[in-house]
């Protein structure tokens, strides 16, 4: 028999170990979290019409999403923008429901843009990111331009130079020009200025042994490729021309030319 006709009453309320409440109306039960329980304020004998039943259904659905969102903001330093996106996805793109839960978190003081931005800046500085990258990412996280601009972030060479061992590991076997370019691009992605990125990239030491090995690899690959379409002389010249453009020295290329026939 429909609830709106009978005015079904709440027959039992049970507090569960997981912090939820089982509210029963005859054979029908609803699981409510603490916030939903307080909002609905059930008691044994309370008459529930169809509107009440619909509300209990909504609260039962909202509970897990609200708990998910609350745990998310407590566990992670996450921007309000990202929180709303995660809630919306969890709520299956039901914007009214997502906004309601998002607003509840704001009212609890759990979504403070200033706190997130400050923690985010500290975290990124610790990770070695430069001022430009940090401010760009703050804007991507939905932080207002005025708040992002309020952080006084100064570029520190001693922070950028900490990447030098990594840059040498990654790029020391490239020819000089390519080595500098790749080092600069890496530091630019980290948010450092062009001038500082170039300065640090110039310090990348050459690993001669690895450079020769890389040249041999490139020479072999290109030579075999060109020999598929050109005669030996033209293949040799085209290989040399491209390797010179890539920054390899003429002496190193000539060394590979002399050894190519012997090894392959």
Image: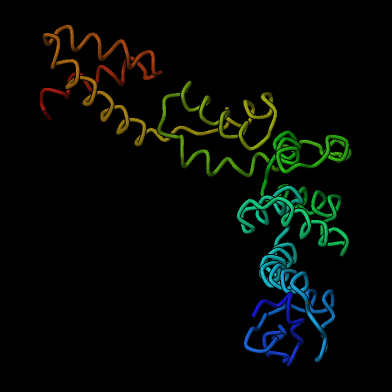
State the residue at coordinates (65%, 83%).
29
Say which quarter of the image contains residue 220: top left
Q: In this view, does 69 lie to the left or right of 179?
A: right
Q: In this view, does 201 lie to the left or right of 245?
A: right
State the residue at coordinates (68%, 35%).
191
Q: Nearer the viewer, residue 67 or 127?
A: 67
Tell me the quarter of the image containing the N terminus. bottom right
Q: Which of 125 and 151 is in front in this view?
A: 151
Query: Which x, y percent locates residue 75?
Result: 70, 66
Query: Which x, y percent locates residue 99?
Result: 76, 53
Q: In this view, does 172 lie above or below 248?
A: below
Q: Is residue 256 left or right of residue 65?
A: left
State the residue at coordinates (51%, 29%).
182
Tell me the colour scheme of the image: rainbow
Query: Which x, y percent locates residue 242?
Result: 32, 14
Q: In this view, does 211 lie to the left or right of 162?
A: left
Q: In this view, does 220 lie above or below 78?
A: above
Say which quarter of the image contains residue 59: bottom right
Tell me the quarter of the image containing the C terminus. top left
Query: Which x, y percent locates residue 172?
Result: 45, 35
Q: In this view, does 118 lie above or below 39?
A: above
């Amino acid at each position: 028999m429909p609830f709106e006709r009978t005015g079904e009453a709440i027959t039992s309320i049970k507090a569960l170990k997981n912090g939820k409440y089982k509210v029963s109306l005859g054979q029908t039960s609803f699981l409510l979290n603490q916030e939903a329980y307080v909002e609905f304020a059930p008691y044994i004998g309370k008459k529930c019409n169809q509107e009440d039943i619909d509300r209990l259904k909504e609260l039962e659905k909202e509970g897990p999403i609200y708990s998910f969102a609350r745990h998310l903001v407590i566990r992670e330093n996450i921007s309000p923008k990202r929180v709303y996106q995660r809630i919306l996805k969890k709520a299956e793109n039901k914007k009214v429901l997502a906004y309601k839960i998002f607003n509840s978190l704001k009212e609890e003081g759990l979504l403070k843009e200033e706190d997130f931005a400050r923690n985010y800046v500290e975290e990124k500085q610790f990770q070695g990111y430069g001022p430009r990258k940090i401010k760009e990412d703050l804007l991507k996280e939905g932080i207002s331009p005025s708040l992002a601009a309020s952080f006084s972030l100064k570029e520190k060479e001693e922070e950028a130079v900490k990447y030098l061992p990594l840059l040498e590991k990654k790029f020391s076997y490239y020819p000089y020009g390519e080595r500098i370019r790749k080092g600069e691009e890496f530091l630019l992605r980290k948010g450092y200025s062009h001038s500082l990125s170039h300065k640090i990239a110039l310090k990348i030491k050459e690993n001669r042994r690895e450079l020769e090995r890389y040249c041999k690899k490139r020479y072999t690959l290109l030579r075999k490729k060109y020999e598929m379409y050109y005669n030996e002389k033209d293949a040799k010249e085209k290989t040399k021309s491209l390797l010179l453009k890539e920054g390899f020295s003429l002496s190193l290329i000539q060394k590979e030319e002399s050894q190519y026939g012997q090894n392959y």
